[in-house]
Image (cartoon, grey):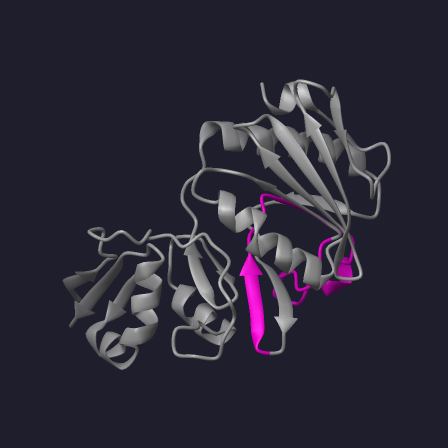
Amino acid sequence: MRMTSTDMQNNFGKYLKLAEAGEDIIVTRNGRDIAKLIAYAGTDEPVLREGAVKYTADNDIVTYEDFLELTEGSEQRHELIDGVVYNMASPSYNHQHAVNELHGTFYNWFKGKPCTPLTSPLDITLKKEETNICVVQPDLVVICDKDQINEKGNYMGTPDLVIEVLSPSTRSKDMIPKLDLYRQCGVKEYWIIDPMKAQVILFSLSDGEIADVNYFSQAHDSFAESKLYPGLQVSMQDLFA
């Protein structure tokens, strides 16, 4: 993304956080590119922070308003979880194959029904607390509250079902802070697809708690089946082909 030198000077702390998340920021002056702010790679700390981060009201936290401002001109995809910005790397073939199989199955099953499955990129805005608004882009969501789509076409509700397909860079984020986020914010069912282990973990969520956990593996199960929508089955063979 490109920022003027004046804007960079006035908001350096904000853009530093975005650079830390992996965004390359070009600084311009009088319409010319003059500098580039990028993350420093010569450190033991990972550029993409994938662990759960405690939400605190200090200067290291990126607010929802900051996030919208910072990412407005970005060509990359970002998520905001507990005040931390994550840059979303390009997915692998196995990741996209799984998403494609999931969406095909879900699309056919939900066709003609009130709910609609959609794939990323689609911003899902969830409020854990008044001062902790998160923005995520799950690999697949099932939306039933279509009245929560505003006049700009942005979805502002809570999906009934969310699916994340793991990759090496997102494994910790999907399994820890995102599970916590979906649990607290009213998602009813959360699927974690693990292509490396050919496994599906299905969390049934209720009243802010994990009500049940079911595991499906390609080695032992023909299908992974939703508990929220009985009869909705995904072929394990096709999912991990």
**Left-right relation of 77 to 151:** left
Q: How many labels were placed on the picture?
A: 0
Residue pictured at 30% horizontal, 61% vertical: 19
**210 is higher (above) or lower (below) than 63:** above
Q: Residue at x 68, y 23 (%)?
A: 236
In which quadrant is the C terminus drawn? top right
Which one is in front, 137 or 30? 137
| Quadrant location, the N terminus | bottom left
Residue interval drawn in magenta: 131-159
- Residue at the image position 23 percent from the left and 53 percent from the top: 43
Residue 74: image location, x then y, percent: 37, 59
Is residue 197 one of those drawn in magenta? Answer: no
Left or right of residue 33, residue 182 in this image: right
Instruction: Please say whether residue 147 is one of the residues in the magenta stretch.
Output: yes
Residue 90: where, in percent of width, then height?
41, 40
Is the residue 45 above or below the residue 61 in the image? above
Farthest residue, direction right? 230
User: Who is closer to the viewer here, 104 or 18?
Assistant: 18
Residue 8 horizontal side relative to residue 148, left or right:
left
For the point 48% across and 74% down, which residue is it? Answer: 63
- Residue 22, image x and y in percent? 33, 54
In this rendering, is residue 184 above or below 110? below
Left or right of 117? Residue 169 is: left
